[in-house]
Image (spheres, rainbow, N blue to C red):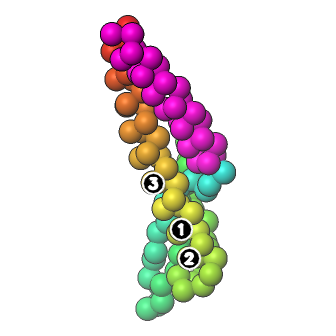
Amino acid sequence: MSDIKSILKEEKERLQKLEKRYEEEISKLPSGTFAVKTRNGKKYAYRAYRLDEKVKTDYIGPVDNDRSRELEKLISRRRELEELLKMTRRKKNEILKVLK
């Protein structure tokens, strides 16, 4: 039984490190969502996010410019990391329950 506990403790530590790494990387990425709106037949990119209780929208530019594509990649990466962080926390909590 002690072998299993030691393995679970190692896994808990690994997940804690992973959780911290995800949190650090997420904090460096822009929050919000990437939205595309059509105006006069042309598509434009916007970033919507919360600031305090209000929803703010920033104009980025035409969808096909480099700035818009880069922002879309960054927001997409943030969402992926948030999902990974959620799974990591879920697994860590399961291990903590088993160790108790």
Q: Quadrant of residue 46?
A: bottom right
Q: Please report contact status of discs 2 and 1: CB closer than 8 Å, yes or no.
A: yes
* Left or right relative to 60: residue 34: left
| Residue nearer the viewer, 30 or 8 | 8
- The residue lying at 41 percent from left, 21 percent from top is 8
Q: CA distance from mark 2 to mark 1?
A: 6 Å
User: How many callouts does the rendering have?
Assistant: 3
| Residue nearer the viewer, 95 or 62 | 95
Res. 80 mark? 3
Res. 73 mark? 1
Res. 57 mark? none
Q: Which residues are magenta?
A: 1-27
Res 55 seen here: no
Which circle's residue, 1 or 3, is located before the other in the chain? 1
Which circle's residue, 3 or 2, is located before the other in the chain? 2
Q: CA distance from mark 1 to mark 3?
A: 11 Å
Amino acid residing under circle 3 = Glu
| Residue nearer the viewer, 75 or 17 | 17
Q: Regarding mark 1 in the picture, which secondary structure is present there?
A: helix
The vertical placement of 21 against 32, above or below, is above
Which quadrant would the N terminus be assigned to in this image? top left
Res. 69 mark? 2
**For the residue carrying disc 2, how many other residues have a C-alpha within 10 Å: few (<14), some (14-19), or many (20+)?**
some
Q: Regarding mark 2 in the picture, which secondary structure is present there?
A: helix
Q: Is residue 20 magenta?
A: yes
User: Which of pointers 3 and 2 indicates the residue nearer the eye?
Assistant: 3
Q: Is residue 77 magenta?
A: no
Amino acid residing under circle 1 = Lys
The vertical placement of 9 against 31, above or below, is above
Residue 3, position as x, y percentages in the image:
39, 15
